[in-house]
Image (cartoon, grey):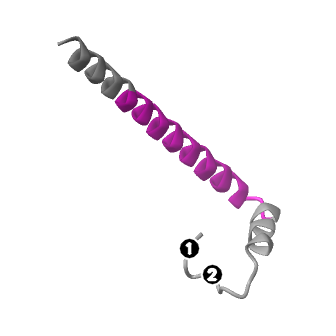
Amino acid sequence: MPPSIHPSRPVDDITILNLRSPTIPRDYSQQQQQQQQLQQQKQKQQQEELLQQQKQKQQQEQQ
């Protein structure tokens, strides 16, 4: 959430307001989708790195 939101205001109210207005939900859901995609990409990268590390370990053990 952007820092401009006043701390005393609960976030739920803001999201509800956003969902009520017709134009914002599209952007909101798009943002969420983008974030999910980014997270998935990060996870893939992490998994690949782990795999490479494991391969390196195996190679070292064989030598």
Under tag 2, what secondary structure? loop
On screen, residue 14 versus residue 53, left or right, reads: right
Which of the image's four quarters has the C terminus?
A: top left
Under tag 1, what secondary structure? loop
Picture quadrant where residue 51 is located:
top left
For label 1, the crowd category at 10 Å Cα-Cα, with few meaning under 14, some 14 to 19 and many 20 or more, is few
Is the C-beta separation of discs 1 and 2 under 8 Å?
Answer: yes
User: At 61% from the left edge and 44% from the top edge, which residue is drawn?
Assistant: 33
Which numbered marker is on residue 24? none
For label 2, the crowd category at 10 Å Cα-Cα, with few meaning under 14, some 14 to 19 and many 20 or more, is few
Q: Type of residue at label 1?
A: Pro
Residue 49 colored in magenta in the image: yes
User: At 78% from the left edge and 64% from the top edge, which residue is drawn?
Assistant: 21
Magenta extent: 21-50
Residue 2 colored in magenta in the image: no
Q: Position of residue 28 (x, y in %)?
A: 66, 56
Task: Report how far apart the C-alphas of labels 1 and 2 lie in the structure.
Answer: 6 Å
Q: Position of residue 56 (x, y in %)?
A: 26, 22
Question: Which residue is identified by label 2?
Answer: 5
Judge by depth and name the residue closer to the eye, 57 or 3: 57
On screen, residue 29 versus residue 63, left or right, reads: right
Establish if 62 lies above or below 47: above
Establish if 13 lies above or below 32: below
Establish if 53 lies above or below 12: above
The secondary structure that most of the magenta stretch takes on is helix
Q: Position of residue 18 (x, y in %)?
A: 74, 66
Q: How many dots with numbers?
A: 2
Q: Type of residue at label 2?
A: Ile
Question: Which residue is identified by label 1?
Answer: 2
Establish if 51 lies above or below 14: above
Judge by depth and name the residue closer to the eye, 3 or 50: 50
User: At 71% from the left edge and 59% from the top edge, which residue is drawn?
Assistant: 23
